[in-house]
């Protein structure tokens, strides 16, 4: 979820490999803790800090943190979150607020200038790679021996392959990612079920059925588009949500999750995503929908508000959704505006790849730590604090639900908000909101966790959706293939123009502005932009890493 919306947007992980060699201690034991003398950096730290133990600083401490300021719940200094966090841990966080829309750019500027705060959360891999060679961020894998909760979850949930996927050429990783016990799906297609019932249609379970359903709707309403979609603005990928879950049906990463390089288990090699057969098939399907006027061509360029208004105004009958938007936006407003309207989100329709999910998605955005933090006398205390807030069961429960008896009650695994408090539209008439008024369920601090905790906020729609998606197999996770710094610089020079060319031509093909008969010419253009050299770079890195690390 991209914060009451986001979801997990973009680059949710490439893939992993050398399981067992590094374990929890990284390549060649570099995470064991003996490589750095931290004896003079323990000011305020707990002498004994273990799994499940409440972190409490030995003296009052404060740490600066970059805060991704979501306009849905803008930062307030009087949030209960801040006050209660200090009471429990002895730590006062000093947030540096950056608007959500400018977060990545501002973060880069601050890091580049050496002005970044110690804690830099809400970072999606591979964004951290750009800051590795300069030493601006820490190789955090060297310090996870100070993080018992982090280590415990990695061990219990067998997350070593996913962590290996984010290691760099030196065998270290520079991002502390959110850890999930199970894969959580985010987006899929939602359709007006009352319209389907009127036409005698069932909810589609495959993309072939989606095509048939859309055709029947178009025949009944020839002046309207069955699907008018959103999530194309403020992202480099047109129809980012639609392509991310449509691509899944073809076994490729697309939209938000697009990466130029992807693992092909059948070929036992990395391939270029935008030139693969699966990607071409996905584009062909999109182009067919556009050509037959089953999808609004403005879906690739319009604002979210425009797309939603078309749905509410019955100019369209389907739209991409996540469970929160389904309930608090589409259904709530449809029921007010259209008598008898009902809408439901379906499990991601199946395609040629079968009942699968993209692999390697149990890591989420995470925390970078500024390199200068290591100079602080309170470094160890800070790492212990990070471990408690982002990785302990109690810290995760606190960040998500707040204070038991004040904001919520719990019985077993069932959580209930206190009367008068709403979460993402759960009670539209409530005077208080858990995010806006209390600061909990904030995407800066709330991600990852056990399935019991992650699913504790699911409404009936999301539970049904997630239960269905949980039955699907994950596609294989590819092996680690970190690039050396010189290789990374070269790859970056090739990667951006290649990515831009894929995005631009995906849109042209989909909209019919370039005929699919020119696909081979498009691939030749990619080769002219060093596609094969980029793929070769990654495959050689994989071979080298495997040879060096077993």
Image (cartoon, helix red, strand yellow):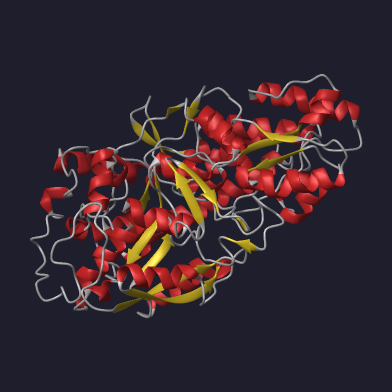
Depth check: give the residue in front, 433 or 112: 433
Left or right of 481, for residue 81: right
Image coordinates of residue 67 in percent, x first then y, are: 47, 70
Q: Residue at x 60, y 32 (%)?
A: 282
The quadrant of the rendering that contains the C terminus is top left
* 133 vs 289: above or below: below
Q: Residue at x 56, y 60 (%)?
A: 434
Left or right of 346, for residue 196: right
Left or right of 48, for residue 474: right
- In the picture, residue 212 is in which quadrant? top right
Depth check: give the residue in front, 103 or 419: 419
* 442 vs 311: above or below: below
* 82 vs 303: above or below: below
Residue furthest top in the image: 200
Q: Residue at x 20, y 60 (%)?
A: 143
* 271 vs 129: above or below: above
Image coordinates of residue 450 in percent, x first then y, are: 38, 43
- In the picture, residue 379 is in which quadrant? bottom left
Image coordinates of residue 410 in percent, x first then y, are: 46, 47
Q: Is residue 279 visible?
A: no
Image coordinates of residue 160 in percent, x first then y, are: 26, 42
Q: Residue at x 18, y 43 (%)?
A: 23
Q: Is residue 410 visible?
A: yes
Instruction: Give the number of marks.
Output: 0
């Amino acid at each position: 979820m991209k914060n009451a919306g986001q979801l997990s947007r973009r680059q949710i992980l490439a893939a992993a490999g050398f399981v067992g060699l590094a374990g929890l201690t990284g390549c060649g034991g570099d995470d064991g803790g003996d490589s750095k003398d931290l004896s003079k950096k323990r000011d305020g730290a707990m002498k004994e800090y273990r799994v499940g133990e409440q972190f409490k600083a030995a003296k009052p401490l404060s740490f600066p943190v970059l805060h991704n300021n979501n306009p849905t719940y803008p930062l307030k200094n009087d949030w209960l979150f801040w006050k209660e966090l200090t009471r429990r841990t002895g730590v006062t966080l000093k947030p540096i607020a950056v608007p959500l829309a400018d977060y990545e750019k501002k973060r880069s500027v601050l890091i580049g200038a050496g002005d970044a705060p110690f804690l830099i959360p809400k970072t999606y891999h591979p964004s951290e790679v750009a800051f590795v060679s300069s030493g601006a961020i820490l190789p955090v894998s060297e310090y996870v021996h100070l993080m018992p909760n982090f280590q415990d979850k990695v061990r219990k949930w067998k997350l070593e392959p996913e962590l290996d996927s984010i290691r760099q050429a030196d065998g270290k990783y520079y991002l502390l990612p959110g850890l999930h016990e199970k894969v959580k799906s985010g987006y899929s297609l939602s359709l007006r079920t009352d319209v389907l019932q009127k036409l005698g249609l069932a909810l589609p379970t495959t993309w072939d059925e989606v095509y048939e359903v859309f055709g029947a709707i178009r025949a009944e309403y020839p002046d309207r588009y069955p699907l008018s979609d959103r999530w194309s603005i403020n992202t480099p990928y047109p129809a980012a949500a639609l392509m991310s879950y449509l691509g899944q049906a073809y076994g490729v990463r697309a939209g938000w999750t697009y990466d130029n390089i992807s693992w092909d288990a059948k070929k036992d090699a990395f391939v270029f995503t935008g030139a693969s057969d699966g990607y071409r098939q996905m584009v062909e399907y999109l182009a067919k929908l556009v050509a037959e006027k089953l999808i609004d061509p403005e879906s690739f360029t319009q604002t979210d508000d425009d797309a939603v208004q078309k749905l509410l105004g019955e100019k369209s009958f389907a739209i991409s959704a996540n469970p929160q938007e389904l309930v608090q936006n589409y259904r709530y407003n449809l029921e007010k505006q259209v008598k008898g309207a009902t809408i439901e989100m379906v499990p991601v329709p199946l395609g040629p790849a079968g009942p699968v999910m993209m692999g390697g998605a149990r890591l989420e955005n995470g925390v970078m730590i500024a390199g200068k933090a290591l100079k602080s006398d309170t470094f160890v205390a800070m790492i212990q604090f990070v471990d408690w807030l982002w990785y302990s069961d109690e810290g995760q429960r606190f960040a998500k639900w707040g204070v038991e008896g004040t904001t919520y009650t719990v019985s077993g695994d069932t959580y209930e908000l206190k009367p008068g408090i709403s979460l993402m539209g759960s009670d539209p008439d409530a005077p208080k909101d858990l995010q806006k008024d209390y600061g909990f369920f904030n995407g800066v601090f709330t991600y990852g966790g056990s399935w019991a905790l992650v699913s504790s906020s699911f409404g009936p729609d999301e539970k049904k959706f997630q239960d269905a998606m949980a039955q699907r197999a994950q596609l294989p996770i590819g092996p680690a293939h970190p690039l050396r710094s010189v290789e990374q610089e070269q790859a970056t020079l090739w990667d951006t123009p290649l990515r831009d060319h894929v995005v631009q031509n995906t849109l042209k093909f989909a909209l019919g502005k370039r005929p699919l008969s020119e696909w081979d010419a498009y691939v030749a253009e990619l080769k002219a932009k060093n596609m094969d050299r980029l793929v070769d770079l990654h495959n050689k890195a994989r071979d080298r890493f495997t040879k060096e690390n077993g």
